[in-house]
Amino acid sequence: MNLRDLRYLLALVEHGHVRRAAEACGVSQPTLSVQLRKLEEELGLTLFERASKGVTPTAACRRLLGHVRAAVAEADAIYAAARSLRDPLSGPFRLGIIPTLAPYLLPLVFAPLREALPALELEPWEDQTAALLDRLRAHELDAALLATEVEGPELASRPLFEEPFFAALSPEHPLAARARIAEEDLAADMLVLADGHCLRDQALAACGRAGALGGPLRAASLSTLLNMVAAGYGTTLIPALAAGAAQDAGLVLRPLVARTARTVRIAWRAAFPRRAAVEAVGDVIAGRLAGFAAAAAEGRI
Amino acid sequence: MNLRDLRYLLALVEHGHVRRAAEACGVSQPTLSVQLRKLEEELGLTLFERASKGVTPTAACRRLLGHVRAAVAEADAIYAAARSLRDPLSGPFRLGIIPTLAPYLLPLVFAPLREALPALELEPWEDQTAALLDRLRAHELDAALLATEVEGPELASRPLFEEPFFAALSPEHPLAARARIAEEDLAADMLVLADGHCLRDQALAACGRAGALGGPLRAASLSTLLNMVAAGYGTTLIPALAAGAAQDAGLVLRPLVARTARTVRIAWRAAFPRRAAVEAVGDVIAGRLAGFAAAAAEGRI
DNA sequence: AGTTTCGATAGATCGCCACTATCACTGCGC
DNA sequence: GCGCAGTGATAGTGGCGATCTATCGAAACT
């Protein structure tokens, strides 16, 4: 059985006339005649009663009609849905974001993304880098915002913007008096995030240290870390986008002497077919953050 | 687009593996591979992301999946429905019956028909001969029970049983004393049905008369006629199956000298495809009435 | 009786779907 | 490091089937 045959059948029911039905279907009269007869043979029942002045659907045919119409309607729905899905910039888009970026970047870019890509249904997913890469490879994400390079032939990535780091201190901290702070000076009492956060490794690397301070402190979020620093437990290194949150927590921020920064990238599977959506999302984010990186680099927050 | 392609698509989604999906569909791997690619081209979107170890449906594909499943399910429903409709002895069967037959014949044959043809959904339709023939020609009836011959090449018919006529009289009527009554003797004060009833013409013909008696009497039903006769307004001729009703109305019945009878036939369109159903219905009715005709012919009621 | 109109049929053509054989790539194991 | 097995894609071919034009046979109308 064929959808084409079902359309022939519907046309024939509607017109009650082989020639006119054939014309409506854009085929010759014998074509429709033969195909209908084949359909009857396949189904094992007479669908039309032929008379000298047209054809009439049999009771059996009328009984099938509901299913036939439904099948054809579903097929049409497939075409219609495909038409609207054809735009790679429409449909769900699952975007992974690392935890040290998500709470500060998302509020900035959500509205611009919605405006630039109204048909794109953004589904943010917050998790650590390794988990995001796993989900990306497993097709559970369409793209991911990371602050590290990605490796392997399976994935690709593109830098979006530079995010400088700042020293975050309680106002009472001795270093708070300086206008700029050298990375090494922070190392003495720097608190860092728990294992798995790329920011942890980046902060440690920036200060030339391999292991972390802080004994039992296992801060799962930047927000926890900021509050600890505000309470006087130490210092820390924060990415520029978290500056606002740090100030809200009562910390003072100081630019770093070496101007250490991290590069935020968007990563995707090389084989991902909606490359255009990835690029568009990347463009919007990069555009929104274009001025930010330069300003932050100069120490303006 | 083709239902076959949709089945390929579903198999591929299910297996995530071209070879296994092809095997499940009973085709070779290249066949499924090529057809799927064509479907993608036709729909203008990528349905699967190909990787080295299998394929994964894209978001667009998952969006279409509902419609695809529905279309295939409806197609399967067509096959299933066709299977159950294949039996010509199943499904609706619209049977026309003339009014002088319906109320007396239907109660007799309804149960036997239901028993012999349980899948046949009998839909009786009571109307006069001419109307039944019109509806038959217009495909609004599948068959009709008549007491007249049918003409024209479009229709066919078959006799089912003989139904003798009886004289129906009030007990007080002078003729009621006779054991048999001559048709001509009834003519004097015979009441007949309104125009359009075949029984009217048959009764008049039997008594050798052209016009009707009874002035303003326009009995639309045999039941009216019987009550009129019972009330002493005249005599009438009734078909044997109405004998019970006549006796219930308090009439006496007498066989006719010339043993006039009518032939009840089943009629159908010559092109009607469910000929078997017509024959089966005819067989059941003829079988149920087999003894009746002989008994009635001998005057036994 | 001729004409028109209906659907069915015959025969030819072309396209597409299916096959086999093979390629290109990847990941794994020795 | 080099086969080997497994993946999907591609090439080339063959056959079936959908389609066409031309025609038929029947029926209805003029």
Image: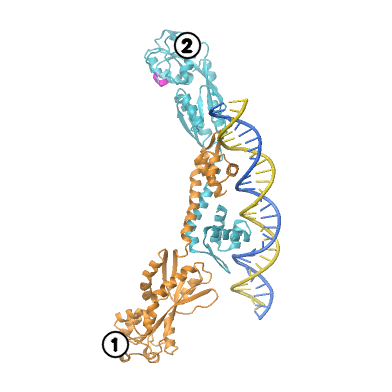
Chain colours: A orange, B cyan, C yellow, D blue
x then y, percent, for residue A84 = 46, 59
Quadrant of the rendered structure where residue B42 is? bottom right
Chain containing mark 2: B
Q: Nearer the viewer, residue B185 or A204?
A: A204
x then y, percent, for residue B195 = 43, 19
Horizontal side of B256 relative to A257 (left or right) equals right
x then y, percent, for residue B66 = 48, 56
Horizontal side of A198 relative to A270 (left or right) equals left
x then y, percent, for residue B40 = 54, 60
Chain containing mark 1: A
Horizontal side of A224 relative to B301 (left or right) equals left
Residue A233 — which label? Answer: none
Q: Is residue A17 visible?
A: yes
Quarter placement of the C terminus of chain A: bottom left
Q: Which residues are magenta?
A: B220-224
Q: Nearer the viewer, residue A164 or B67?
A: A164
Residue for badge 2: B209
Magenta part, dominant SS: helix
Q: Disc 1 to disc 2, how far (Cα)?
A: 127 Å
Inspect the image, locate mark 2, and give the three-letter code of the amino acid beneath it: Arg
When the figure is inspected, residue A241 is found, relative to residue D9, above or below; the finding is: below
Circle 2 sits in a helix, a strand or a loop, which is it?
A: loop
Quadrant of the rendered structure where residue A102 is? bottom left
Circle 1 sits in a helix, a strand or a loop, which is it?
A: loop
When the figure is inspected, residue A250 is found, relative to residue A94, above or below; the finding is: below
Residue for badge 1: A171
When the figure is inspected, residue A196 is found, relative to residue B165, above or below; the finding is: below
Q: Is residue B181 visible?
A: no
